[in-house]
Image (cartoon, rainbow, N blue to C red):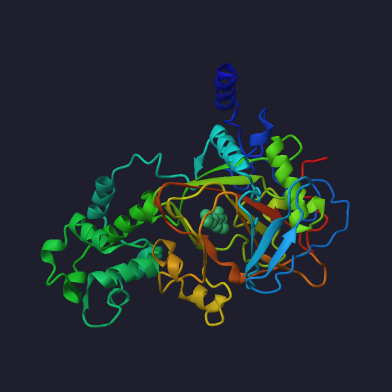
């Protein structure tokens, strides 16, 4: 047994370094292209059916939510009792899939959750955006560069405008205004201590009058250095990143692990979607968040001109394609000691519209779930074995295929306070009326 395990680890470490799109020797760990680092295959012409024609005409369906709090029972797996589906919000339609009695296995059993975590660990977890693990630069060296060159890059030129800092126009900038500036213009969310630390590090603390920066003093400051400091935190410090987690991708097709294949069948029965659609979904993404891990408010599908090709049908990478994820099914794979909730910012909201939060993105900390988790409208705590599901896009009424993005689906993962959080995502992609002739690049055959 032990020998088999050692062999497996060896096998994985030797063969897993394949490139994006490389199905290699280890089929269950195939990395999809548009999230990978390198693009090898290109299929740039949306009229070209380079992935094979989609042979069947089909239409998408959405489950009925009925109303918030509504309960439905669904048979999703032969030999298991039905699962309970609770509508937790109508806009967007968020369904929580669990079972009623503790003795009934949940949507995923404990063993299945543990198994998926093991597979993800074996496949090798990577940080969500490359950067801080490999960062070996030196902050002070970076700042020293700014000492010899005070010029602000054109995209940072706004930072030289005193009135953007002095939000209340009282002729001085205080710590709160520094925080607001960073949040508003840099999407960098600092706390009081971090502002103090920055002021100290940049050696401007001695010259502050009552902890405030007057315009005269501001005009003598090296703003380029302040911007470099902020950029450094934003890019390199895990806590300040928009997303702080590690991930692995697990394939779910006919060559996949039996647990993942069985789950795939359950998803077909749950969503009532044509098999072909579920087959064309992305490989399963497994995410691990450690302490302070989070994912600020975002949409899972991209808002773009509907004629822009979908990434799953063309081996392109954003911004040349858009992510067309009709459904997200998110599985909680463990119980988190504290924190790690999934928050839907404006679910069932009758007062705040997507327009309002999108426009206020620059003005507030709205999307910062490290501090705004509990002011979100729907906050779901992670519960091992429970799945939550929602529709990122509407159905286009003319074609029955992927329609506009539902902008009320803004959501994210709140900070893990204690322990760690493991989740998995099944993103079910779908074609649009412009691309219905192109097969999903993930549809590699299941039967
Ligand atoms: C995601 C996501 C939420 C969470 O991975 O896209 O929204 O609770 N995650 O981790
Ligand atoms: Fe998401």
Please indicate whether residue 365 sits to the left or right of residue 424 in the image.
left
Please indicate whether residue 291 sits to the left or right of residue 376 in the image.
left
Please indicate whether residue 77 sits to the left or right of residue 118 in the image.
right
Q: Position of residue 371 (x, y in %)?
A: 39, 64
| Residue appearing at x 82%, y 55% in the figure | 274
| Residue appearing at x 60%, y 55% in the figure | 318
Q: Quadrant of residue 134?
A: top left
In this view, the residue farthest toward the right is: 56
Q: Is residue 404 visible?
A: yes
Image quadrant containing the N terminus: top right
Q: Quadrant of residue 11?
A: top right
| Residue appearing at x 74%, y 69% in the figure | 64
- Position of residue 361 relative to residue 200, above or below, is below
Which quarter of the frame holds ligand 1? bottom right
Q: How many marks?
A: 0
Q: Is residue 321 visible?
A: no
Q: Position of residue 24 (x, y in %)?
A: 67, 30
The residue lying toward the viewer, choosing from 37 and 339, is 339
- Position of residue 298 relative to residue 421, above or below, is below
Q: Position of residue 140 (x, y in %)?
A: 24, 47
Image quadrant containing the C terminus: top right
Q: Position of residue 356 (x, y in %)?
A: 51, 78
């Amino acid at each position: 047994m032990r020998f088999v395990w050692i062999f497996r680890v060896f096998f994985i470490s030797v063969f897993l370094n394949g490139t994006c799109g490389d199905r290699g020797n280890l089929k269950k760990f195939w990395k999809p292209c548009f999230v990978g680092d390198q693009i090898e295959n290109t299929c740039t012409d949306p009229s070209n059916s380079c992935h094979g024609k989609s042979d069947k005409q089909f239409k998408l369906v959405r489950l009925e939510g009925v109303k918030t709090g509504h309960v439905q029972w669904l048979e999703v797996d032969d030999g298991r009792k039905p699962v309970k589906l609770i509508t937790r919000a109508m806009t967007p339609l968020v369904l929580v899939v669990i079972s009623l009695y503790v003795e009934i296995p949940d949507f995923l059993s404990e063993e299945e959750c543990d198994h998926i975590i093991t597979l993800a660990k074996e496949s090798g977890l990577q940080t969500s955006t490359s950067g801080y693990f490999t960062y070996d630069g030196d902050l002070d060296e970076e700042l020293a560069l700014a000492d010899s060159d005070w010029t602000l890059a054109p995209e940072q030129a706004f930072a030289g405008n005193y009135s953007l800092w002095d939000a209340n126009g009282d002729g001085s900038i205080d710590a709160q205004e520094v925080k607001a500036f960073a949040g508003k213009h840099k999407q960098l969310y600092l706390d009081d201590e971090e502002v103090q630390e920055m002021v100290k590090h940049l050696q401007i603390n001695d010259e502050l009058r009552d902890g405030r920066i007057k315009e005269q003093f501001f005009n003598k400051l090296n703003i380029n250095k302040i911007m470099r400091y902020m950029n450094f935190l934003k890019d390199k410090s895990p806590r300040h990143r928009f997303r702080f987690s590690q991930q692995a991708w697990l394939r779910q097709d006919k060559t996949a692990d039996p647990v993942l294949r069985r789950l795939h069948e359950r998803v077909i029965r749950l969503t009532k979607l044509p098999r072909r659609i579920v087959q064309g979904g992305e490989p399963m993404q497994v995410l691990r968040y450690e302490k302070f891990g989070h994912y600020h408010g975002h949409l899972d599908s991209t808002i773009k001109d509907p004629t822009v090709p979908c990434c799953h049908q063309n081996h392109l990478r954003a911004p040349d394609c858009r992510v067309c994820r009709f459904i997200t099914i998110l599985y909680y794979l463990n119980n988190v000691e504290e924190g790690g909730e999934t928050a839907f910012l404006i679910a069932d909201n009758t007062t705040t519209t997507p327009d309002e939060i999108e426009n206020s993105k620059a003005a507030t900390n709205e999307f910062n779930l490290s501090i705004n988790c509990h002011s979100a409208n729907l906050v779901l705590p992670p519960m091992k074995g429970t799945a939550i599901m929602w529709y990122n896009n509407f159905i286009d009424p003319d074609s029955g295929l992927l329609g506009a993005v539902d902008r009320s689906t803004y959501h994210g993962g709140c900070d893990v306070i204690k322990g760690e959080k493991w989740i998995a995502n099944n993103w079910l992609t779908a074609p649009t009326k412009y691309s219905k002739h192109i097969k999903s690049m993930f549809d590699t055959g299941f039967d």
